Amino acid sequence: MPNSSLTTHVSLLSRLRDTSNHRAWSEFQHRYQELLGRYCRRRGLQAADAEDVVQTVFMNLSKSLPQFVYDPNRGRFRDYLYRCTKNALAEWSRRRNLRPEALDTSAVAAADDPADTTLWRDEWVAHHYRLAFERIRTDFDARNVEIFERNLNGESIAELARAYQVNEDAIYATRRRIRTRLQELIAAQVQEEDQIDGDGSRPKPVA
Amino acid sequence: MATEAGRSPSLDPRLDALFGFDRDDEDWLRTVRDRRAEPSLGRVGPYELIEVLGRGGQGVVYRARQPGTGREVAIKRISAGLFASPESRARFEREIEAVATLDHPNIVAVYGAEVIDDQPLLVMQAIAGLPFDRWAALAGQRRPRREILGVFVLVCDAIQHAHQRGVIHRDIKPSNILVDSHGRPHVLDFGLARLERATPAAATLTQTGGFLGTPAYAAPEQLRGLVREIDVRSDVYALGAVLYEAL
């Protein structure tokens, strides 16, 4: 079952409808900064340029999110965020190309490429893993987290069993428990992401 | 046994497939590993960016490698870059102006200001250290008061140096004081600094932004947005809050 602590409180997106809720905006930025930045960097932007685009996305969202109209045919929040980011990328490219010395449009040339949708989807998956790992580090004791991280980084079950002087079943069990918890956490996170006012409402996409 | 079968109970098949939970453990681990790989940060002009050191309302600070010398530096760049408002740009330029007037062993050294791709950058000494509060509570055991006070006195000396040159920091807090491995504090981030000899335009700038700073350490006049009343005493108040917390 999804983690109740992630689903029973008023969702973050609902709180964002109140523009004076600075704590919610700060939390939103903290949560999505990395996803947007990494996506832009994968699109070929330098980190500093990616920061520009991310700030623009946040600025645009601060205007559009409080006035959303529910439209179930328009897709999920992640699709909306994707379109916002692509629009900001296009705007960034337009402004940059106003300068005669900067005529590089390669970063936005791939905007309608199906591979770009895959790239966004992969980064969105990575984003949810990052959030879930933050919880794993508090939900599990440090030793189990360390075992899992070492396994994730390529050390075999046998090597870990030797290193921690336990039998291999214990290592398998640790991995299994963390995997199951990650699955639960991610399911809850994704569910919350699509909740506005608790009814799954979503903002209309930006033009 | 179940742990080796490598499959978790399914919650939502589409979600499971997207996140790799429909695969056995080894395949799933590979998926997670691939998703965690970091894309390169790239460059700003000639500087190779290594990592993001900090990100705040005013700017982003990167650890970067200087071309030629290979020396590691900290580069501060204004948030939003090309999209930054004229007020934000003016505030950043004021920070550059403020730090240019300072030269103190306990204030982060500034190597220079540059403009790259129409964006102003501040190039500073890269400090490897701990924020003051974490340094004071290292390994869960609070340091001796004498040691904490010894470092704090150096911080006060640095802030006094700034005040004597007409610079009010306005955002003194533990994370803006890094203590290096030799126990030397370094005051950083003059992003909200105000110059006492501010021009009328700059004075207006400080009044239009509403509350700026960190509430936990901000003096009452700063919390209330009474910009004209903010002076050296506001920094002294913040220093007191930092010390109180550290002790």
Image (cartoon, coloured by chain):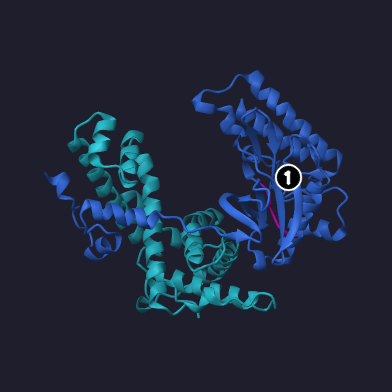
Chain colours: A cyan, B blue
Indicate the quadrant containing the C terminus of chain B: top left, top right, bottom left or bottom right: top right
In this rendering, does residue A2 appear at all? no
Q: Which is more toward the observer, A196 or A115?
A: A115
The percent coordinates of residue A87 (x first, y second) are 52, 75
Q: Quadrant of residue A201?
A: bottom left
B90 relative to B126, above or below: below
Tell me, yes or no, whether the highlighted magenta stretch contains residue B210.
yes
Q: Residue furthest left?
A: B1
Question: For mark 1, does the 10 Å Cα neighbourhood hold few (<14), some (14 to 19), or many (20 or more) residues?
Answer: many
B158 relative to B148, above or below: below
Q: Quadrant of residue B34?
A: bottom left
Q: What is the magenta range?
A: B208-213
The percent coordinates of residue B131 (x first, y second) are 60, 36
| Residue at x 13% of width, y 46% of height | B2
Predominant SS along the magenta part: loop
Q: Quadrant of residue B218?
A: top right
| Residue at x 50% of width, y 78% of height | A109
B3 relative to A51, above or below: above
A61 relative to B235, above or below: below
Amino acid identity at mark 1? Arg
Q: Which residue is mark 1?
A: B170
SS class of the residue under badge 1? loop
| Residue at x 66% of width, y 46% of height | B71
